[in-house]
Amino acid sequence: MAMHNLPHPGEFIIQVYLDPNNLSSCEVPNDTSNSLEIAL
């Protein structure tokens, strides 16, 4: 089945990952290598 009017990738990320976890884009690290160094 073909999908029409696909959501913008940013909207998808917000709806699927950020909103359910009460996160904002400012709270998500942009570079995972830096966040892994901090976590270790």
Image (cartoon, rainbow, N blue to C red):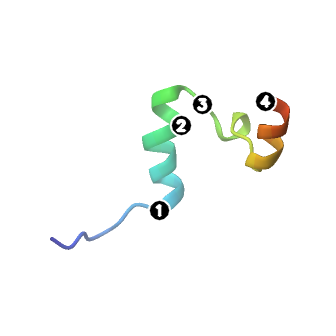
Q: Circle 3 is placed at which residue position?
A: 23
Q: Is residue 35 above or below residue 11?
A: above
Q: Quadrant of residue 26?
A: top right
- The type of residue carrying mark 1 is His
Q: Are marks 1 and 2 in contact (CB under 8 Å)?
A: no
Q: Which residue is drawn at 60% across and 30% down?
A: 23
Mark 2 vs mark 4, CA separation in Å: 20 Å
Q: Circle 1 is placed at which residue position?
A: 8
Q: Circle 4 is placed at which residue position?
A: 39
Mark 3 vs mark 2, CA separation in Å: 5 Å
The mark closer to the camera, 4 or 3, is 4
Mark 1 vs mark 3, CA separation in Å: 19 Å
10 sits to left or right of 35:
left
5 sits to left or right of 39:
left
Q: Which residue is drawn at 32% across and 68% down?
A: 5
Q: Circle 2 is placed at which residue position?
A: 18
The mark closer to the camera, 4 or 1, is 4
Which residue is most to the left?
A: 1
SS at circle 3? loop
Q: Do the residues labelled 3 and 2 touch (CB within 8 Å)?
A: yes
SS at circle 2? helix
Q: Which residue is drawn at 45% across and 30% down?
A: 20
Spot occupied by residue 32 in the image (x, y as percentages of width and height):
73, 47
Q: Earlier in the sequence, mark 3 or mark 2?
A: 2
Front-most of 40 and 14? 40
- The type of residue carrying mark 2 is Leu
